[in-house]
Amino acid sequence: MSGVESLIYMHREDMVVLRGEVRQARKDRKCHSREMDQAFKEMRAKLAAEMHETSTSSRFRGAMAFMSVLLTVLSI
């Protein structure tokens, strides 16, 4: 019976070690994820600051050109 008890004891010790490793891995992933999120936010803010503002006329220029081409094609 002592062999079974020693196996159970070893299994419990292994499970405690594995739980600790899982907790540490989860903690490391969260820290890494936070760092990546922060870097992404900084990059997005930098890109937003560098981009020029679009005017209303430039937004609709492409749509108007497409509609005029479409009307031209349909009228043929």
Image (cartoon, grey):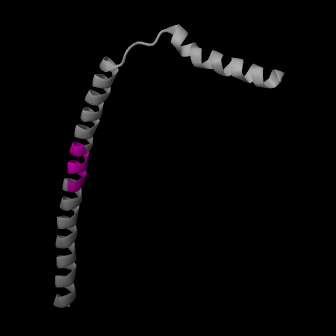
For the C terminus, give its image quadrant: top right
For the N terminus, give its image quadrant: bottom left
Q: Quadrant of residue 68?
A: top right
Q: Which of the pair 57/21 is nearer the observer? A: 57
For the view shown, which residue lies furthest in the front direction?
Answer: 76
Eyeballing the image, is 52 above or below 12?
A: above
Q: Percent from the top left, x then y, of residue 22?
A: 24, 59
Q: Which of the pair 75/63 is nearer the observer? A: 75
Magenta stretch: residue 45 in it?
no
Q: Percent from the top left, x then y, of residue 26?
A: 25, 52
Q: Quadrant of residue 35?
A: top left
Q: Percent from the top left, x then y, of residue 27?
A: 21, 49
Predominant SS of the magenta segment: helix
Where are the magenta residues, as a range? Answer: 25-32
Q: In this view, does 76 lie to the left or right of 28?
A: right
Q: Is residue 31 left or right of residue 48?
A: left
Name the residue rendered at 17%, 78% in the picture.
10
Magenta stretch: residue 28 in it?
yes
Q: Quadrant of residue 64?
A: top right
Mark count: 0
Eyeballing the image, is 56 above or below 41?
A: above
Name the residue rendered at 22%, 62% in the picture.
19
Name the residue rendered at 22%, 55% in the picture.
25
Q: In this view, does 31 lie to the left or right of 76?
A: left
